Image: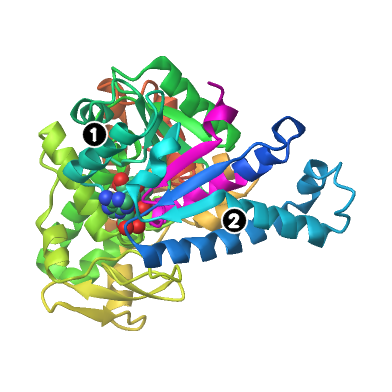
Amino acid sequence: MTLDERLSNVSVVGAAGKMGSGITLLLAQEMARLSLLPQNRGKVFRLNAVDLSPEGLRGLQEYVHAQALKAAEKGAVGLRALYADREDLVENGEIIEDFVRRVESMVWPSTQLAAASGSHLVFEAIVEKVPVKVSVLKQLREIVPDDAFFFTNTSSVPIGLLDREAGLAGRIVGVHFYNPPPVQKLVEIIRAPGTRPDTAETAAEIGKRLRKTLIPAADVAGFIGNGHFIRDGLHGLQEAEALAKNEGWPKALWTVNRVSQDWLLRPMGIFQLIDYVGIDVFRFIQDVMGKFLEEPLSHPVVDAMIEHGVLGGQNPDGSQKPGFLRYEKGRITAVYDLERKDYVPLDPKGWTAEADARLGPLPEGFRGWKALAGAPDRDAALKAHFDAVAAMKTPGAELARRYVKRSREIARRLVATGVAARPEDVNGVLTSGFYHLYGPINDFCA
Ligand SMILES: NC(=O)c1ccc[n+]([C@@H]2O[C@H](COP(=O)([O-])OP(=O)(O)OC[C@H]3O[C@@H](n4cnc5c(N)ncnc54)[C@H](O)[C@@H]3O)[C@@H](O)[C@H]2O)c1
C-alpha cells in the first residue's frame, strides 16, 4: 500500500489534545493537498479526529479553521500552483477559501474509537499513561484493518512494550513530534526491535512529506529529547535545592533559571521550560523513565509543586499558566516560594537585584540567545562567551560550568548507551527540538 493510499483514511486519537490537534492540522493540510492532485481527483480522503472530549473536538475545529486560514494566506503563492487548472477560481481569496474549506472537510470529529475502523494509519496522542495507551491500542487493533500502522507520540514509553502489550506484531513505531507540531521541525523516530521495516519506512516517508527534521532514537524510555531534558531539569532542581538552603526558594529558583538561560545562552531558563512543558507532564515522564530505566529521576520539589496544585502548562488561549514562575504577557513577574506556598513578585530594586549581584556580571559584550540566534558571527561569539565563562571566578560562572558539564555528561551517556547513534543526533535534537544554539557535545564549552 502506498503512502497516499494509507492517507486516504487516517485517524488521530487524542485529536483534541495539545499534540493531537497539531498533528490533525498537519495531516488535514497534507490530505487536502493530495486531494487536489490530478491523479487523486474523485478519491475520498478522511481524517477521523477521535477524542473523549466533545468540547475539545469543537475547539479543534475552530483551531483547524484558524490555523489553516493563516497558513493558506501565508502560502497563497504555492497554493496557486495546486489550483492551476481550476479556471473557476481566479482570485487568491477564492483559492484560499476553497483550500481552507477542503482542509476542514478532511476532519471528521468523533468521541467514539469505532470511528477509526477504516483507517490504515492511526496516530495515537492520548495521555502518557501506559495502561491507558495499551488499552486504547488494543481496542484499535481489534477494529482497524490488519495492515494498519500505528504511530505513537509517546514522550517516554518504550515502543516495544506498547507493541507487546497491545499485540501489534511490529506495526507500531514512535513518531515523536515536538510541541507545537505545526511549528516544531523535529520529529524523533523510534523503532522498537520488533518494528516492521515497512512501518518505520512509512513513518520516515510521512515525516519527510510534512517537511520535518527526522532523527532516529533507540527504543529506550525517554528517547533522546526527554532523555536529556529530564536529567537536565533534575540537575537544575538539585542546584536550586542546594541554593535554597541559604537563600530561600525564590532566589534559588530565580538564580538557576537565569544561569540556565543567560549564561548557557538558551532560549529559556530551565524552570520556564518545565513550566512550559507542564510540571505534571514533567513528572509523568520522570515516573515512566524512572520505572523503565531503574534510575532515580524523581525530585521532592516536583512532587511538592503538584501537591500545592501548581502545574504550569498553557491556558486554552496559549498563555502560560503559573508554575515555578508566574508570567504576564510572556514575561516573568514572580517566583514561587515553596515554603510560603505563594508567589513572591520580582523586585528589581530588592531581592532580585541581590540575587543577580551575587551571581556576578555576565561576560563582557554579552549578547543573549535572541541576539545570537541569527547573528552572522554566532559561532565565534559562542566560543568567546564560553571562553570568558571558563575564565571567570564568579558564582554565576561556576554554576554555568557545572550546568554545561552535566548537560554534556548526559548527552555523552545517551550516545554511549546507544540511545543516540551519534553525537550529531543528540546535538540535532537539542538544536532543532529545543532551539539551543549549540549541541551539548562540542569542543568550545569548557
Ligand atoms: N505536550 C507536549 O509537550 C508533548 C510533546 C511530545 C509528546 N507528547 C506526548 O503526546 C501525548 C499527548 O500529550 P498532550 O500534551 O497532547 O496531552 P493532552 O492532555 O493535551 O491531550 C490528550 C488528549 O487525549 C484525549 N484522550 C485521553 N484519553 C483518551 C481516550 N481513551 N480516547 C480518546 N481520547 C483520549 C484527551 O481528551 C485529550 O484531548 C502524550 O503521550 C505525551 O507524552 C507531549
Residue 42, percent from left and from top: 70, 38
Amino acid type of the residue tagged 1 in the rendering: Ala
Residue 221, percent from left and from top: 23, 34
Q: Secondary structure at mark 1?
A: loop
Query: Can residue 178 be seen by looking at this rendering?
Result: yes
Q: Residue at x 22, y 73 (%)?
A: 336
Establish if 415 lies above or below 124.
Answer: above
Which quarter of the rendered picture does the C terminus lie within? top left
Q: Relative to the observer, which residue lies in front, 94 or 311?
A: 94
Q: Relative to the observer, which residue lies in front, 1 or 241?
A: 1
Amino acid type of the residue tagged 2 in the rendering: Glu
Mark 2 lies on residue: 104
Q: Do the residues under discs 2 and 1 have CB atoms within 8 angstroms?
A: no
Query: Can residue 181 be seen by looking at this rendering?
Result: no
Tell me if residue 95 is in the magenta stretch: no
Establish if 293 lies above or below 11.
Answer: above
Mark carried by residue 153 = none
Q: Secondary structure at mark 2?
A: helix
Which residues fall within the magenta stretch?
Answer: 1-29
